[in-house]
Each structure stands twice: as structure tokens, then as C-alpha cells.
Image: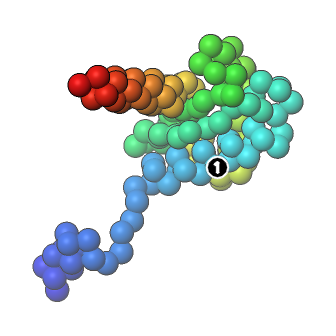
Amino acid sequence: MTGVKQTAQSLGLGKKTRKRPARVADAVMRELALLLLQDSRDPLLREVCITRVTATDDLRLATVYFTCLAGPDAASTVIKALRHAAGYMRGHLAHTLNMRFTPDLHFRYDSTAVEAERLERIFQDIGAERQSDESDS
């Protein structure tokens, strides 16, 4: 019976469970996003968008990746504001998530969107250059 169960799971059949750190990271992301939208008194923090959260296996540390409407130039100011509010956020998470340990929050600016935009411009330039080469010949 065990062999059949292992074979079924290896083929992707049966119940799929996600690791706890991923579930906790999703919960932290949801709660922080709601907290920033609803309870933030700092107008700079209301412009913050949480893009993803990762948690360590022991759930002691959560890295919060964010972007902001003010752009990448304001990232250092936003990180300072987030670090200032981290204690309040952590207390809110402790009360809401009801975990034995509430993870420490570390904040990082997520430059993925900026990099994607930069690459998109490069591809557009290459496409425009190819079109001009084809029309010249």
C-alpha cells in the first residue's frame, strides 16, 4: 500500500501540501498589505505595494519585498519608514496570526518591475532597429 501511495504522489496525484513557511509567508503578505492600506497613518506607506514575502524554515525571519508608487528613487526613504513601523506591524501579525513566534520583518525593495521595464525598452529598441534595417534593404 505504501508503494502505491508514494507512486501516486510522485506522479502528482493525491493531496498536495505546501510547506508551512510558504503558507506563513502568504498570510504575512495578506495581513501586511491590508494593514498598510487600512491603518497606515504615513501617506508614504500607503503607496507601498507588497510584491512577495519569503519566510525562513524556522519562521523566525520574513523578508518582505515591496515596490512603491513613488518609484525606485524613494526606496531608501520607504525602507526607513517601514523599519520604523516594523514593531507595530509585527505586533499586529502576532495578534492576527496567532503563532508561537512572530517572524522578524526585513524589508527589501523589489526591483523586478524596474528590470522588466528596462528589458522591455531594450527589446523595443531592438525591434525598431530591425524594422528600420528591413525597410532600408
Q: Helix, strand or loop at disc 1?
A: helix
Q: Residue at x 74, y 31 (%)?
A: 47
- Asked whether residue 86 appears in the rendered view, the answer is no
Residue in the foreground of this view, choosing between 119 and 113: 119
Classify residue 1 as left or right of residue 60: left
Classify residue 137 as left or right of residue 58: left
Q: Quadrant of residue 78?
A: top right
Q: Residue at x 16, y 82 (%)?
A: 4
- Asked whether residue 12 appears in the rendered view, the answer is yes
For the C terminus, the image quarter is top left
Q: Residue at x 59, y 31 (%)?
A: 66
Outermost residue, bottom direction? Answer: 1
In the image, residue 118 above or below residue 56: above
Q: Position of residue 93 (x, y in %)?
A: 68, 44
In the image, residue 40 above or below residue 126: below
Q: Residue at x 43, y 39 (%)?
A: 56
Classify residue 128 as left or right of residue 52: left
Question: Across the whole image, how many numbered discs are drawn on residues?
Answer: 1
Outermost residue, left direction? Answer: 3
**Residue marked by disc 1:** 30
Q: Position of residue 84 (x, y in %)?
A: 72, 20
Q: Position of residue 122 (x, y in %)?
A: 39, 23
Residue in the foreground of this view, choosing between 24 and 136: 136
